[in-house]
């Protein structure tokens, strides 16, 4: 799948065609959820949720040129979940293959509890599969999301950056197998692999730029490890050697990697709503 973000049906059609010429692509997804001011300021991403006619035009113009799957990734509204009923009427009338729902409004960004009842309402209403998204960070929260919404699938963002084994764990659990718990030395190996990949693929002039790029990932990965002190150290790192030394100090051991991230109040809010209540 390739995801497009924009608001001009003609541009989106041209881009979808260009992607189709470049590589085999399972389908096209349109972003109706990004809350970044630079994106919403251009009336794209989440801002499109305020313009139903434009969403309709985009979908109907893309449908004939997308041979594969056509889907939307949405939130529950721009300002308020009260907008979701009218959005559902719109989505139900569109020729889509699926809809992914991040269970928050644009205003709520990433921090509020996830409105699972609204996702369940979409599952009950729409004639095609709904994929549930928002604050799935563990096998328990994935199972809770499925139980509460009845969604056909799950989409995982921050939780998968933190724990790339989460998909295996969820599959194991749903198949009745005990998910394998990971140990901190496996997290160390993951971080080394990620550092190599970032170094190889990025166009960096200075070592500090690689370190800064890695911090965007370790913010999530190291959340809660050693009571937060690994992240504190990594945020101060300026060289790859210093970064690696901190990782080795905290991760080169057999302790278990926590099943859920340590909640520091900024990165993974909303998980308690999903994971621990019914
Ligand atoms: C750093 C970052 C980048 C993101 N980029 C995109 C994106 O390009 N397209 C998209 O649909 N959502 C994007 N999202 C939103 C996620 O797909 C997801 O909807 C949101 O993070 C909530 O799910 P989560 O709790 O599993 O992370 C991004 C989120 C983060 C934190």
Image (cartoon, rainbow, N blue to C red):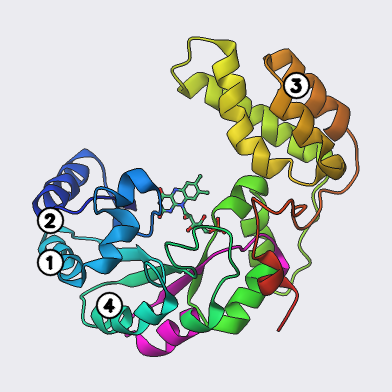
**Mark 1 CB within 8 Å of ligand 1:** no
Q: Give the mark, 2 or 1, whose residue is nearer the N terminus.
A: 2
* Residue positioned 40% across, 48% down in the render: 36
Whole-number angstrom distance, CA of label 2 to CA of label 4: 17 Å
Residue furthest to the bottom = 124
Q: Position of residue 122 (x, y in %)?
A: 41, 83
Q: Residues within 10 Å of mark 2 (few under 14, many from 20)?
A: some
Magenta segment, which residues?
Answer: 119-140
- Mark whose residue sits in front, 3 or 2: 2
Q: In the rendered view, would you say 191 is above or below 90? A: above
Q: In the rendered view, would you say 242 is above or below 214? A: above
Residue furthest to the top = 205
Any magenta on residue 231?
no
What residue sits right under mark 1 in the picture?
Answer: 57
Whole-number angstrom distance, CA of label 2 to CA of label 1: 7 Å
Whole-number angstrom distance, CA of label 4 to CA of label 3: 48 Å
Q: Position of residue 245 (x, y in %)?
A: 81, 20
User: Disc number at residue 9?
Assistant: 2
Dividing the picture into quadrants, the one containing residue 70 is: bottom left
Check contact, mark 1 vs mark 3: CB within 8 A: no
Whole-number angstrom distance, CA of label 4 to CA of label 1: 12 Å
What residue sits right under mark 3 in the picture?
Answer: 244
Report whether 203 appears left or right of 230: left
Residue furthest to the right = 254
Q: Give the mark, 4 or 1, whose residue is nearer the N terminus.
A: 1
Q: Give the mark, 2 or 4, whose residue is nearer the N terminus.
A: 2
Check contact, mark 2 vs mark 1: CB within 8 A: yes
User: Disc number at residue 91?
Assistant: 4
């Amino acid at each position: 799948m390739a995801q497009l973000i924009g608001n001009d049906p003609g541009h989106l059609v041209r881009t979808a065609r260009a992607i189709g010429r470049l590589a085999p692509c399972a389908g096209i997804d349109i972003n109706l959820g990004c809350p970044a001011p630079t994106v919403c300021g251009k009336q794209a991403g989440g801002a499109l949720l305020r313009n139903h006619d434009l969403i309709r035009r985009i979908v109907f113009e893309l449908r004939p040129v997308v041979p594969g799957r056509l889907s939307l990734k949405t939130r529950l509204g721009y300002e308020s979940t009260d907008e979701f009923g009218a959005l559902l009427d719109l989505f139900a009338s569109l020729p889509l293959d699926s809809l992914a729902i991040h269970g928050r409004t644009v205003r709520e960004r990433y921090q509020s509890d996830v409105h699972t009842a609204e996702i369940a309402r979409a599952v009950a209403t729409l004639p095609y599969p709904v994929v549930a998204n928002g604050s799935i960070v563990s096998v328990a929260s994935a199972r809770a999301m499925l139980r509460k919404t009845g969604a056909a699938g799950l989409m995982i963002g921050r939780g998968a950056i933190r724990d790339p084994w989460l998909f295996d764990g969820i599959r194991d659990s749903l198949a009745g197998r005990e998910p394998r718990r990971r140990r901190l030395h496996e997290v160390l190996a993951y971080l080394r692999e990620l550092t190599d990949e970032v170094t190889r693929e990025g166009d960096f002039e200075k070592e500090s730029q690689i370190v800064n790029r890695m911090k965007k990932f370790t913010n999530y990965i190291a959340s809660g490890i050693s009571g937060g002190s690994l992240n504190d150290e990594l945020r101060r790192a300026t060289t790859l050697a210093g970064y690696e030394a901190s990782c080795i100090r905290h991760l080169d051991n057999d302790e278990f990697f926590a099943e859920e991230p340590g909640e520091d109040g900024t990165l993974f809010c909303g998980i308690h709503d999903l994971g621990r209540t019914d």
